[in-house]
Image (cartoon, rainbow, N blue to C red):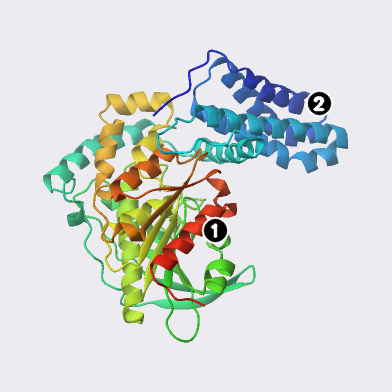
Amino acid sequence: MELSPPRQWEWLGLMPIAAGLYWLLAHGGGDWWIWAVWPGALLLASGVALLLMPGDDRVLGVMGGGAVLGILATPLAWIVADLEAAFYGMVMSAASLLVAGRIGLQRQPRHAGVPPPDMSVAMDFKAGLDEALLGYFVCTATVPSGAHAERMCEESIRLEALMRERGWVTDPASLHPAPPPPDETYVERARTFGIDYEVLRFDSGFVPPMILPGADRWLGYEANRSCHVRLLRHPGPPRPWLLCLHGYRMGVPWLDLSLFSPGWLHHRLGLNLIQPVLPLHGPRREGLRSGDQFLDGDLLDLLFAEMQTLWDVRRTLAWLRTQEASPRIGVFGVSLGGYNAALLAGYEQGLDFVVAGIPVTDFAAALWRFLPPTHLRYFTSRGLDQDRYSRLLSAVSPLARPPLIGSSRLHIFAATGDRLVPPSHALALARHWQVGVSWYQGSHLSVRHERVPHAVLRQAVAGAGWMVE
């Protein structure tokens, strides 16, 4: 791994400072301030922090978020002010977005075997959008504090001791029994943006070992007890099934169907699609937003979330196998879905292929990267450091067990300029699977518009010998 030399001053921070001041001072009146204060404050604060205190990855997320808010506020600024004021606000916001993307790319460690990201305006824009999404995730995340943080740290020590005592750290398969198919199911028709599909519902039936600290709290998430699975299937003879695993904070139809395009996968490739909603997402959510409590909130909940994800996905496949004799099944996961596709490969036999797209593989490293320094110091002082958290999650790590299918059926693609899931995650999975990575010049959010993911999936379909119309 190679890092760029550090800088004492980051002079590109002058751009968001100027943009922030412009939004705050360019026009008077309360109507302007309603729309200008948010991009103005975020850009000014992040610009000053970048100029004087470079190196904190959270700053670029705040900058990207402020820049996107400035671009989105442009039409409203035009209405309450004038075209000139709105235009310059938009231009300076867009320039700040490019600054966030460029600095993020410059800071990104270089790894052997990973093509360097293109240093172009287009790549700066893609990386800037990644930074904006990171800013949203980081600034709106619930971080355990006060008595909650104290309890969590105490539970982490007890949890690790129990997992070692039961052998779940060295033998994670013993923690994940194969689920039976559901006894009762309900299927109803639905339609979103002109796309017709079915929704399969059944009880999850997942119950974690009750000796684990926090297990009773997890079972208190009532909406999470029911599984929701979208189905798009062709009439007539059986066809191959593509299991599609969505990303973090997705799980709602319009997002999932835009990522796993029915026009391409269902109609053009002729595949049946099966799309489980992951725990705590979509109709299974427990907070205001899809995905609340999965990666934010109590850090120990992530263990239960991944245990139930593996259970629910395998239970979904058990149901499918009661509907067809020896169905052909391939797996396609993106981001958090890539993690769970890789995890599934170590537990589920009979899969035709697994495609892990822009996969996260180390949640401990991913979350520790963005936790506030005060929380990190407190967690470490109370025994919950990154190493212990990594050991706690080893029982649900895709790197803990070898895949149950051959390497020719395993595929990985990743982005050279990914600011949410750095290339090191895909490299770790590639070493574990002993396969290569197909890289594309883009970012996390640009995955929908890149050619490489389509090519990799086509390669997986062809390698499995699927004859589709």
Residue 382 percent location from the top left of the image: 27, 27
Residue 41 percent location from the top left of the image: 66, 27
Q: Is residue 389 visible?
A: yes
Q: Which residue is drawn at 79% across and 34% down?
A: 32
Q: Does the residue at mark 2 contact the one at mark 1 (Cβ under 8 Å)? A: no
Res 26 label: 2
Residue 151 percent location from the top left of the image: 29, 36
Q: Which residue is drawn at 35% across and 47% down?
A: 430
User: Does 39 appear above or below 165?
Assistant: above
| Closer to us: 446 or 225 | 446
Foreground mark, 2 or 1, reads: 1
Residue 399 percent location from the top left of the image: 28, 47
Residue on which the image places disc 1: 259
Tell whether 259 sits left or right of 79.
left
User: Alpha-carbon neighbours of circle 1 within 10 Å: few (<14), some, or many (≥20)?
Assistant: some
Tell whether 305 sits left or right of 250.
left
For the residue marked with disc 1, what is the amino acid?
A: Leu
- Please state the total of marks drawn on the protein image: 2
User: Does 314 appear above or below 75?
Assistant: below
User: Does 86 appear above or below 271?
Assistant: above
Q: Can residue 279 be seen in this view?
A: no
Give the quadrant of the N terminus.
top left
For the residue marked with disc 2, what is the amino acid?
A: Ala
Tell whether 38 sits left or right of 159.
right
Rendering quarter of residue 95: top right
Q: What element carries label 1?
A: helix
| Closer to us: 142 or 113 | 113
Q: Is mark 2 on a helix, strand or loop?
A: loop
Closer to the chain start, of discs 2 and 1, is 2
